[in-house]
DNA sequence: CAGGATCCTTGGGGATACTG
DNA sequence: CAGTATCCCCAAGGATCCTG
């Protein structure tokens, strides 16, 4: 408690400053960087619903490597978006699921995925047109 | 119109295949990769409203370099999300704005930015907790 | 099954200097 | 002002092999 308590009222929920992702120093920028990569953008929405296992995810996310899967999941877990449940059995049985806040984020990210799926044709057309123009 | 017309009905809006971002080969994956980086995630939402100039963007997007700004804008332009308007004056006056489809995407991406701003405190807390736990 | 450990390559991306 | 051109380097990330 160094120099906080600006109004003696704000404290319950983020009142430290408006939070601006466009500001390089803002902590929210870290969050953006956490989710601004294709594997996170694919994994998080994929984790809605049933908890899923390593191999399941490995198969469902086309093109991901074991290394990146583990790395991304650990990163998300460290940031409280994903919960890792190790059932402590042999052979190992580990399941990943979204935390409440991760679920909240997944709703937003699904929109991104859906947008990509819905509009890729137009994007491809634009690329094609640009290519021909050049 | 090479070999299209599967049902003679579908043609108006994407009926070639369901489009699945989780499929490594799906063209929509390219779209995802196009926007799955922090600069695109910051630039696209920033470009709503008034067309903006290079220097403006350079100042508004904290931490971006001239190189990455140009590179990202060109990439987005090539994919039809951003329109570049060179007013052909001297000194140069170039403005960037969103295409209709880019505007559509911006609405989705703004949600991501807003989420990051709104929830960074919880994320930070989770990180902190994980750090102490370890 | 779930992953850790290494090795190795590519390219993302910053810094700096120059140009029309 | 709006870039382009270089240099350069670190780290993202794939491939492969090994372990509890």
Image (cartoon, coloured by chain):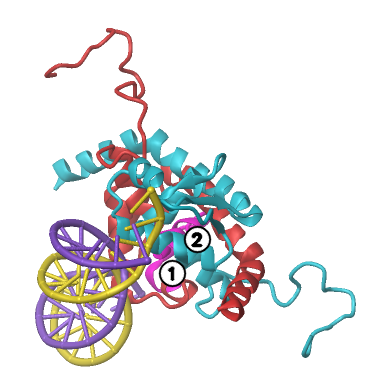
Chain colours: A red, B cyan, C purple, D yellow
Which residue is rendered at x = 60% and y = 77% of the image? A133
Depth check, front residue: A28 or B129: A28
- Which region shows up in magenta? A36-56
Q: Quadrant of residue B15?
A: bottom right
Where residue A53 sits: x, y (%)? 41, 66
The C terminus of chain A is located in which quarter? bottom right
Depth check, front residue: D11 or D2: D2
Secondary structure under tag 1 reads helix
Cβ atoms at labels 1 and 2 below 8 Å apart: yes
Q: Is residue A94 above or below residue A132?
A: above
Where residue A125 sits: x, y (%)? 65, 73
Which residue is rendered at x = 66% and y = 71% of the image? A121
Q: Is residue A86 visible?
A: no
Secondary structure under tag 2 reads helix
Query: Circle 2 is placed at which residue position?
Result: A46
How busy is the neighbourhood of tag 1: few (under 14 within 10 Å), some, or many (20 plus)?
Answer: some
Where residue A129 sits: x, y (%)? 63, 75
Q: Is residue B23 above or below residue B79?
A: below
Same-chain status of marks 1 and 2 = yes
Query: Circle 1 is placed at which residue position?
Result: A57
Q: Which numbered dot is residue A79? A: none
């Amino acid at each position: 408690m160094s120099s906080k308590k600006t109004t003696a009222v704000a404290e319950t929920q983020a009142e430290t400053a408006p939070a601006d992702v466009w500001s390089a120093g803002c902590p929210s920028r870290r969050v953006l960087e956490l989710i601004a990569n294709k594997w996170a953008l694919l994994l998080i929405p994929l984790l809605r619903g049933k908890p899923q296992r390593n191999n399941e995810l490995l198969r469902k996310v086309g093109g991901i490597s074991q290394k990146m899967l583990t790395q991304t999941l650990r990163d998300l877990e460290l940031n409280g978006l994903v919960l890792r449940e190790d059932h402590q059995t042999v052979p190992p049985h580990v399941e990943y699921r979204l935390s409440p806040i991760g679920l909240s984020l997944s709703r937003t990210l699904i929109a991104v995925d859906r947008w990509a799926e819905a509009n890729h044709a137009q994007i491809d057309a634009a690329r094609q047109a640009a290519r021909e123009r050049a």
